[in-house]
Amino acid sequence: MTEFDDAEFDETADMAALLDEADEFDVAPLRLTVDLAALGENWRDLARLSGRARAGAVVKADAYGLGIEDCGTALYHAGARDFFVAAASEGATLRAYAPEARIFVLCGIWPGQEQLFFDHDLVPVLASEEQLAFWMAVIAERGEHPCALQVDTGFNRLGLSVEEAMELAQDVSRPASFSPVLVLSHLHSGDTPSADANRAQLQQFRDVSAAFEGVEASLSASAGIFLGADYHFDLTRPGIALYGGEAVNGMANPMRPVATTESRILQIRTAKAGETVSYGGTHRLARDSRLAVTSVGYADGYLRNLSGAGVALRTSVAAGAFGFIAGHRVPVVGRITMDLTIFDVTDLPQGLITAGDYIELFGPNMPLDDVARAAGTIGYEMLTSLGLRYERRYLDGHF
């Protein structure tokens, strides 16, 4: 029997694991590639655009569907030190990958979660009088711990009203252990630079932030960063733009694509003019056709509204989705089903593609937001709807 020392065994095992991973990706029905180097560069670009303000990073919803562990690590290595999650459980997961970061929990804290916040050093974002009262009781018992305050300046979503926030700022009876480290608000029309509401919200937030003298302030998410220095304050909160999505309506997207999804062709079949395709027979072929049946469906976040026919959206948005393969855009035909989608590949030269090849669903050749528009939605929903069946590959590029 051949003997190996521990180092040789570890190296052999590591190589075998890498080969297994590569093989799984090479043959997977569905593939998701996440370019962590592009993610890091997007953060650096947004940090530069934030001017004198620091740039944080929003990694809620499993880093917009792309994986909070890997994306959080990449963003931390890029330089992010302020992270925003929606739920405390997300923050607890992130802590292992961002050890020295401040992690803000946007949905605040509720009874029974106290230990989670203290164990993982999470910062609750308090958004109501009820949460404030509960937090006061917590720190009275446990001692000082940082918190943040969310103020509603016109969104009518989460947040203290401006009046409640001003009263709190002027309340000399609040305990000394109450120590907010950030006051924040959110623009409801930041993606529309011409919207009058942006200036109105800015003015209200200026008043609030001035009342909390010495406390850092944050107003802008991805879209607000592009509105200019007036909106940056001390800390910006980029989200969708980090992951390559469009942040501002009517502006060319300057961000690098981060996510690429691909579906494997299971079969290429021929069909005659006059025949129908998929459920309901809603698409009738106008010519003899070649059809590529691929292994993606609405269970994988490839939304039914992307169908080429048979959904109500097609009455207002004429074209459904396209995929990309071998240098060609190919349209979805018929209804998308739970596990399968059919693309018309008739215009590709015979023999150029075969069963087993992959069609890009969105990525560098099929921009995420173009695909989203074909579904009548936004890139956020496309990313956060990714199902569990994608084999994932992360390209780090040494960050």
Image (cartoon, rainbow, N blue to C red):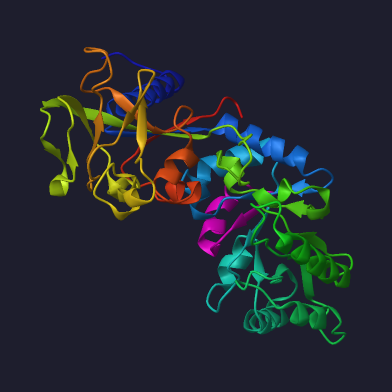
Please, is residue 183 above or below residue 396 in the view?
below
Give the side of residue 309 with respect to residue 131, left or right: left
Residue 301 at x, y percent in the picture = 35, 47
Residue 337 at x, y percent in the picture = 22, 46
For the C terminus, the quadrant is top right
Residue 143 at x, y percent in the picture = 73, 75
Please tell me whether residue 93 belongs to the stretch shown in magenta: yes
Task: Name the residue rendered at 81%, 83% in the picture.
Answer: 167
Residue 338 at x, y percent in the picture = 23, 48
Q: In terms of depth relative to the viewer, which is nearer, 195 or 46? A: 195
Please, is residue 281 above or below residue 102 in the view?
above
Give the side of residue 377 with respect to residue 140, left or right: left
Give the side of residue 80 with respect to residue 67, left or right: right
For the N terminus, the quadrant is top left
Splitting the image into 4 quarters, where does residue 181 fall? bottom right
Please tell me whether residue 287 belongs to the stretch shown in magenta: no
* Whether residue 175 can be seen here: no
* Whether residue 272 can be seen here: yes
Give the side of residue 12 with respect to residue 133, left or right: left
Range of magenta residues: 82-101
Task: Name the residue rendered at 19%, 41% in the picture.
Answer: 283
Splitting the image into 4 quarters, where does residue 250 fall? top right
Q: In terms of depth relative to the viewer, which is nearer, 54 or 6? A: 54
Looking at the rendered structure, the number of numbered marks drawn on it comes to 0
Q: In terms of depth relative to the viewer, which is nearer, 186 or 348? A: 348
Task: Name the residue rendered at 59%, 72% in the picture.
Answer: 109
Splitting the image into 4 quarters, where does residue 291 fall? top left
